[in-house]
Image (spheres, rainbow, N blue to C red):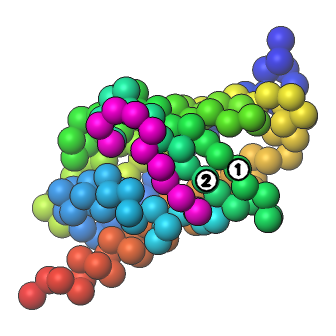
Amino acid sequence: AGDRYGAHMKLNFEVVIDASIRDVWAAFADTRNMDRWQQNFLSYTQKSGAPGQPGSIAEITYDENGRKVVLTETITERREDAFLAAGYESSHGSTLIVNRFEAVDGSTTRWTAWCNFRFRGVMKLMSLFLGGSIRKRTEGDMQRFKLMVETDIAGTQT
């Protein structure tokens, strides 16, 4: 019944990156890069399991207008170079994000992200107004990631 009130939202994103799938995956899988491309990122703290592997749990903290927001990340599936799925829980709701990487050719990679948001409490109502800002923020993060990877790769190629 909650879904009638905007408690559920699905968004899909895609970006093409001028770098090999191996280089894109390496940059994506390295949590030390998160502050370089994720807006408002503060910290990533591994809590249990092998980092980035199915079943691992981490806390990711963001600064949202001066307020700390902590997400609990649980990796649900991983296929090296191609696929990473994770669930994110917070006091505002839960999100499932499936990231897929596919080689367009030897030096170009397509990153597709499918995001399924479920909101709780007052965020159910707020979700009616958040779609545009969530889309803008995620597209911005993906563009920053693309720039980071292309700049790093361009800087190391001979």
Identified by mark 1, the residue type is Val
Residue 50 drawn in magenta: yes
Identified by mark 2, the residue type is Thr
Coordinates of residue 63 in the picture (x, y in percent): 70, 61
Dominant SS of magenta comes to: strand
Mark 2 residue crowding within 10 angstroms, few (<14) / some (14–19) / many (20+): some
Q: Is residue 78 visible?
A: yes
Along the line of sight, which residue is nearer the eye, 67 or 153? Answer: 67
Q: CA distance from mark 2 to mark 1?
A: 6 Å
Along the line of sight, which residue is nearer the eye, 51 or 154? Answer: 51
Give whichever of discs 2 and 1 has the lower sequence position: 2
Q: Residue furthest left?
A: 158
Q: Which residues are magenta?
A: 41-51
**Disc 1 on helix, strand or loop?**
strand
Residue at numbered disc 2: 61
Q: Residue furthest front?
A: 47
For image coordinates 24% across by 67% down, the residue present is 19
**Disc 2 on helix, strand or loop?**
strand
Asked if the residue at tag 1 contacts the one at tag 2, i.e. Cβ–Cβ closer than 8 Å, the answer is yes
For image coordinates 33% across by 81% down, the residue present is 151
Q: Is residue 97 visible?
A: no
Residue 69, numbered circle: 1
